[in-house]
Image (cartoon, rainbow, N blue to C red):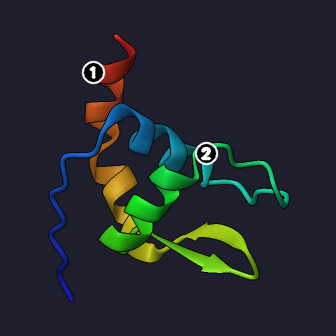
Amino acid sequence: MNIDVDLDLSPDQWEVLKALRNPMPRGRLAKTYVVEDLVKFGLVTIRDGIPVMTSTGRKVLVRGSCHLLDLAA
């Protein structure tokens, strides 16, 4: 299956997506509105009250890594 996802994410959305690469303890995420947007895009899911990156989210993060370098510059 070939999924081509091209989303124009905000810097906050990229930061949250990057933060979700590692498991998060409960109650550590401050920007819940950003997580809600990422859930709508199918990049994040909520399991037991904890946001978890989906496989699509990982693909978007990998494909968008060059965009992340532009944001850091």
Mark 1 neighbour class, 10 Å CA radius: few under 14, some 14 to 19, many 20 or more: few
Q: Secondary structure at mark 1?
A: helix
Mark 2 neighbour class, 10 Å CA radius: few under 14, some 14 to 19, many 20 or more: few
| 60 relative position to 3: left or right | right
Q: Residue at x 78, y 48 (%)?
A: 28
Sooner in the amino-acid sequence: mark 2 or mark 1? 2
| 73 relative position to 22: left or right | left
Q: Residue at x 27, y 21 (%)?
A: 70
Residue 14 vertical position relative to residue 17 in the rendered view, above or below: above
Residue 21 x, y percent position in the rendering = 61, 54
Q: Residue at x 61, y 54 (%)?
A: 20
Residue 1 vertical position relative to residue 28 in the rendered view, above or below: below
Can residue 64 be seen in this snapshot? Answer: yes
Residue 59 vertical position relative to residue 8 in the rendered view, above or below: below
Q: Secondary structure at mark 2?
A: helix
**Residue placed furthest toward the top:** 73
Can residue 58 be seen in this snapshot? Answer: no
Please name the residue that numbered disc 1 is placed on. 70
Label 2 close to label 1 by CB (< 8 Å): no
Amino acid beneath label 2: Ala
Residue 57 x, y percent position in the rendering = 41, 65
Picture mark count: 2
Q: Residue at x 58, y 54 (%)?
A: 32
Distance from Cα at disc 2 to Cα at disc 1: 18 Å
Residue 27 vertical position relative to residue 40 in the rendered view, above or below: above
Quarter of the figure with residue 50: bottom right
Please name the residue that numbered disc 2 is placed on. 19
Residue 36 x, y percent position in the rendering = 47, 63
Quarter of the figure with residue 24: bottom right
Amino acid beneath label 1: Asp
In the picture, which quadrant includes the C terminus?
Answer: top left
Residue 11 x, y percent position in the rendering = 36, 32
